[in-house]
Amino acid sequence: MQRTFANLISQAKQAAQNAYVPYSKFKVGACALFESGNTYIGCNVENSSYGLSLCAERNALSNAIVEGEKSKLIAIAIVSENMPECSPCGACRQWIYEFSQEAKIILEKQDKTIISFDIKELLPNAFLI
Ligand code: THU
């Protein structure tokens, strides 16, 4: 599993390179792994109307949906060269929870070790219809 997580981190780093961040200069990349074995990447995409900016995690999850992914989300890695252990924002936590209540959140620490959290830890008492 550690090797899988390292691979997701590496793909997320690749994705972050394409981040469109003229305003914050804060590049984020994400890579989502589904039960099918498929992975989907995303980067943040900002807008001059700041509030319309899209986070890397939601971009990756949207890519999965547009590609027709139907299986359960297993894990999502998130990275930013600007911040070790770049944790998902509240909106992205809710998005992750939508695709699995058991998803793992994979982050890289400053010393390059990989840590994981359960979405339920990061979004307790979540809303779900
Ligand atoms: N950002 C993400 O892409 N994911 C997060 O979970 C937190 C924030 C982006 C949004 C914005 O483009 C930049 O990071 C600074 O907030």
Image: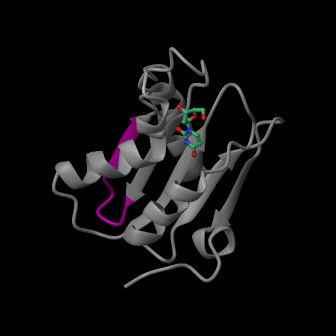
Q: Is residue 27 left or right of residue 108?
A: left
Residue range corresponding to the magenta coloring: 34-42
Asked if residue 37 can be seen in this view, the reply is yes
Q: Quadrant of residue 98?
A: bottom left
Residue located at (50% from left, 20% from top)? 21
Q: Position of residue 107 (x, y in %)?
A: 66, 48
Q: Position of residue 55 (x, y in %)?
A: 47, 40
Asked if residue 1 can be seen in this view, the reply is no
Residue 37 falls inside the magenta stretch: yes
User: 114 or 86, which lies in front?
Assistant: 86
Image quarter (top left, top right, bottom left or bottom right) of the N terminus: bottom right
Residue located at (31% from left, 52% from top)? 38
* Vertical relation: 13 (above or below) 2: above
Q: Position of residue 25 (x, y in %)?
A: 60, 18
Residue located at (44% from left, 27% from top)? 46
Image quarter (top left, top right, bottom left or bottom right) of the C terminus: bottom left
Q: Is residue 80 left or right of residue 44?
A: right
* Vertical relation: 122 (above or below) 46: below
* Vertical relation: 81 (above or below) 53: above
Q: How is the model colour-coded?
A: one colour
Q: Position of residue 59 (x, y in %)?
A: 37, 42
Residue 53 falls inside the magenta stretch: no
Q: Which residue occupies the extreme top position in the image?
A: 22
* Vertical relation: 34 (above or below) 89: below
Ligand 1's quadrant is top right
Q: Which residue occupies the extreme right position in the image?
A: 111
